[in-house]
Structures are given as structure tokens and as C-alpha cells.
């Protein structure tokens, strides 16, 4: 018989600290090196393009301008649900470069949630594409953290993440609905002054569904959803995390960093202590 690992225990709790410290330091170092080189070569502009979108959306909402419209290219359009627009309206008064640094901080904390400790976060920095996600304006690491937290029994963040990329909600155990409902209600309440955004958002998704939104993985969404259903049938934490990952509708090559979530869950399960 086994028992679940307490939430505060890292996925690396059985590894010797003498081995983890140099691994963590190396992970942080290699990530910083990639970001510095990428910034100097123009690969990682500051602020990145996505952050400029979040800034535009926030300013537009405060100024009463439309935020859901066809941008050219479509990758410059805004696809998240209205509660995210309200969040960006509360932050976009900051200069874009400050906004970018704030989002980087959020993703660093997300890495800690995924790994279960700051030491583990340093080790997790070795995972491919972590540096790219930290330097970009995307929220892939936040999505991964939401998936891991949901599998661990804390579904609140997954509700918020699902309003951006849908998939994380699949990681939530249906028995956790009492924790989900208050967050969903709060998300709806903050949009009360802008209720017209909801039909605008739905129409925006309906009109442009199937449009080319960038270099996505060439795997049809329906095929990924069918696989996600099969994974859920396994009734394993790692399978639920993987199902939530591949169910994200617009899955770009950069989105592969979210695979860190099911890997973290799998490692955690393999290291859980045996019950006496």
C-alpha cells in the first residue's frame, strides 16, 4: 500500500543534496546563458511580441476599445477568455519591459511549483525550452504549473489557466468541483463591467477556428483529444497530466515545454514513500 507524497515534498526528495546542488546551479547557469545569448542575437527581444499583445489588450480594455478582432497576422490577435483581459488591464499601465519582467517572475515561480522546491526548479531548468519560455511572452510554464497543481489536488490555478488554453482543466479531478466553483465564479464576476466581451470572444473563436495561428505541431486537434480521452481512462496521475497537456487547442512547438508537467508528476509518483 502506498500513500501520496505531501504537497511540500519535492519530486527530488530522495536524491542526495550533494548531487542536486551542482545540478540546480548548472540548470540556472545554462538557462541564463541561453537567455543572454538569445537577447544579444535578437532571438529574445525585450519586450517580446506576446507581451506587447497583453499590453495592447489591457490598454484597449481600459480605453473602451475592441480587443477581439482579426489582426494581421492572426498570431497578433487575442484569444484568451475575458477574465485574462481584465487581468492585463490591471497590469498594462506598467512599461512593457517591466510587464515582461513581472511575467518572467511569474514563470520562475511556476517552475518552483512544478518541481516542488527551489532546488528542484534549478534542476528542472535543464528541461528543453525552459529558457525560451522564460524569455518569451507566453505562459506555457504557468500552464504546466496549473496542471501539476491540479493533479496534486489544488485545482484553482487550473481554472484560471483553462480560460487561456483549455487543456489544464482536464487535470482537475471532478471530485474537486467545490474548489473549482469559487474560482470560476470570481473569474466571471470580474468581467461584469464588460459582459459583452464573452459573446465577442466566442464569436472570435468560432470565426477563426482552424485558421493558421503559427508553427503548430502537425497533429490534428481531434486526434489529440481522442488520445487524451484514452489517457484519462488509465486513471493515473501522470496520464491525467499528459492528457491535459496534449488537449491544449493551439499547440505550438514552443508548447512542448508543458511536457515538463506530466514528467514531474511521473517522477513524483515513482518516488513516493511506501506506507509502513
Image (spheres, grey):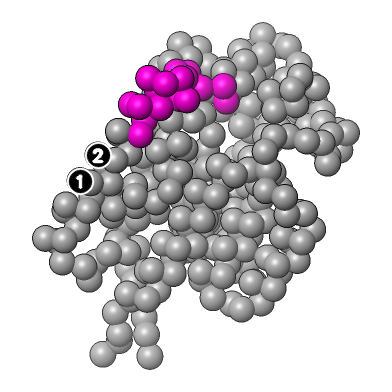
Q: Which residue is mark 2?
A: 29
Which residue is at the far left? Answer: 18
Label 1 environment density (alpha carbons within 10 Å; few <14, some 14–19, many ≥20):
some
Q: Determine the image quadrant of residue 235.
A: bottom right
Quadrant where the image shows the C terminus: bottom left
Badge 2 vs badge 1, beta-carbon distance below 8 Å: yes
Q: Is residue 116 left or right of residue 49?
A: left
Q: Determine the image quadrant of residue 102.
A: top left
Which residue is at the far front? Answer: 41
Residue 228 appears in view: yes
Q: Is residue 150 above or below residue 36?
A: below
Q: Is residue 127 above or below residue 8?
A: above
Q: Give the residues drawn in magenta, as a range.
A: 34-50
Q: Determine the image quadrant of residue 14.
A: bottom left
Q: Is residue 54 above or below residue 242?
A: above
Label 2 environment density (alpha carbons within 10 Å; few <14, some 14–19, many ≥20):
some
**At x 62% / y 15%, what residue is drawn?**
56
Q: Which residue is mark 1?
A: 25
Name the foreground residue: 167 vs 189. Answer: 167
Q: Is residue 39 magenta?
A: yes
Quadrant where the image shows the N terminus: bottom left
Give the image location of residue 94, x and y in percent: 46, 13
**At x 57% / y 18%, what residue is drawn?**
52
Secondary structure of the residue carrying tag 2 is: helix
**At x 48% / y 14%, what residue is drawn?**
96
Amino acid at each position: 500500500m502506498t500513500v501520496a507524497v505531501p504537497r511540500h515534498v519535492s519530486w527530488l526528495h530522495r536524491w542526495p543534496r550533494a548531487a542536486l546542488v551542482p545540478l540546480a546551479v548548472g540548470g540556472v547557469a545554462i538557462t541564463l546563458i541561453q537567455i543572454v545569448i538569445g537577447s544579444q542575437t535578437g532571438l529574445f527581444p525585450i519586450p517580446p511580441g506576446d507581451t506587447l499583445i497583453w499590453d495592447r489588450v489591457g490598454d484597449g480594455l481600459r480605453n473602451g476599445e475592441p480587443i477581439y478582432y482579426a489582426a494581421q497576422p492572426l498570431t497578433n490577435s487575442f484569444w484568451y477568455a475575458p477574465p485574462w483581459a481584465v487581468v492585463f488591464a490591471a497590469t498594462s499601465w506598467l512599461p512593457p519591459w517591466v510587464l515582461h519582467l513581472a511575467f518572467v517572475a511569474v514563470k520562475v515561480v511556476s517552475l518552483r511549483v512544478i518541481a516542488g522546491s527551489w532546488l528542484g526548479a534549478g534542476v528542472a531548468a535543464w528541461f528543453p525550452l525552459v529558457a525560451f519560455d522564460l524569455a518569451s511572452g507566453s505562459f506555457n510554464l504557468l500552464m504546466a504549473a496549473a496542471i501539476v497543481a491540479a493533479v496534486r489536488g489544488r485545482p484553482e490555478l487550473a481554472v484560471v489557466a483553462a480560460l487561456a488554453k483549455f487543456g489544464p482543466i482536464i487535470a482537475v479531478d471532478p471530485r474537486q468541483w467545490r474548489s473549482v466553483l469559487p474560482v470560476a465564479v470570481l473569474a466571471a464576476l470580474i468581467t461584469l463591467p464588460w459582459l459583452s466581451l464573452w459573446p465577442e470572444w466566442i464569436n472570435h473563436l468560432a470565426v477563426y477556428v482552424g485558421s493558421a495561428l503559427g508553427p503548430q505541431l502537425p497533429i490534428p486537434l481531434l486526434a489529440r483529444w481522442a488520445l487524451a480521452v484514452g489517457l484519462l481512462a488509465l486513471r493515473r496521475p501522470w496520464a491525467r497530466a499528459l492528457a491535459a497537456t496534449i488537449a491544449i487547442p493551439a499547440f505550438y512547438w514552443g508548447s512542448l515545454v508543458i511536457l515538463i508537467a506530466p514528467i514531474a508528476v511521473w517522477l513524483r509518483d515513482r518516488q513516493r514513500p511506501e506506507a509502513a
